[in-house]
Image (cartoon, rainbow, N blue to C red):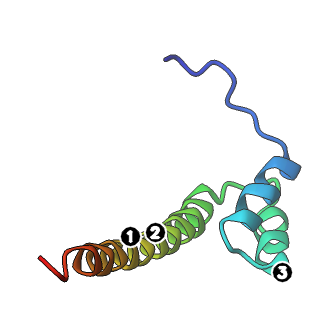
């Protein structure tokens, strides 16, 4: 798949960042800091940090899901 439209609005960025767990203050800082300047490296750092945090959360939930599945399995097979 070839991406041809690489533009994204500030509103779309704010929504994604908010859903990823950044506070309103962090979102505003991301959007306003370095506005009109070349701060790509700093913005990528913030984005990668948010991604890492979200992925860690997913892994914790997956571990809990695995443990619940094990309890279900033990419960179902207790009398065998």
Query: Residue 4: percent from the left, percent from the top?
Result: 63, 18
Near-viewer residue (43 or 76): 76
- Residue under numbered circle 3: 25
39 to the left or right of 76: right
Residues under numbered marks 3 and 1 in contact, where contact means CB atoms less than 8 Å apart: no
Residue at 81% of width from left, 59% of height from top?
14
Near-viewer residue (20 or 9): 20
What is the count of numbered marks? 3
How far apart in space, not on screen, are marks 1 and 2 (Cα)?
6 Å
Q: Nearer the viewer, mark 3 or mark 1?
A: 1
Whichever of callouts 3 and 2 sits on the residue coming sooner in the sequence is 3
Near-viewer residue (63 or 14): 63
Residue at 17% of width from left, 81% of height from top?
79
Query: Label 2: how many residues lie within 10 Å, few (<14), some (14-19) or many (20+)?
Result: few
Mark drawn on residue 62 = 1
23 to the left or right of 11: left
How far apart in space, not on screen, are marks 3 and 2 (Cα)?
24 Å
- Residue under numbered circle 2: 58
Residue at 26% of width from left, 76% of height from top?
70
Residues under numbered marks 1 and 2 in contact, where contact means CB atoms less than 8 Å apart: yes
The image quadrant where one finds the C terminus is: bottom left
How far apart in space, not on screen, are marks 3 and 1 (Cα)?
30 Å
Check disc 2 and report its element: helix, strand or loop: helix
């Amino acid at each position: 798949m070839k991406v041809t439209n690489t533009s994204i609005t500030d509103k779309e960025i704010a929504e994604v960042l908010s859903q990823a767990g950044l506070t309103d203050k962090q979102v505003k800082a991301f959007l306003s800091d370095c506005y009109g300047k070349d701060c790509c490296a700093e913005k990528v750092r913030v984005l990668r940090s948010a991604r890492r945090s979200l992925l860690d959360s997913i892994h914790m939930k997956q571990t809990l899901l695995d443990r619940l599945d094990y309890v279900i399995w033990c419960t179902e097979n207790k009398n065998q």
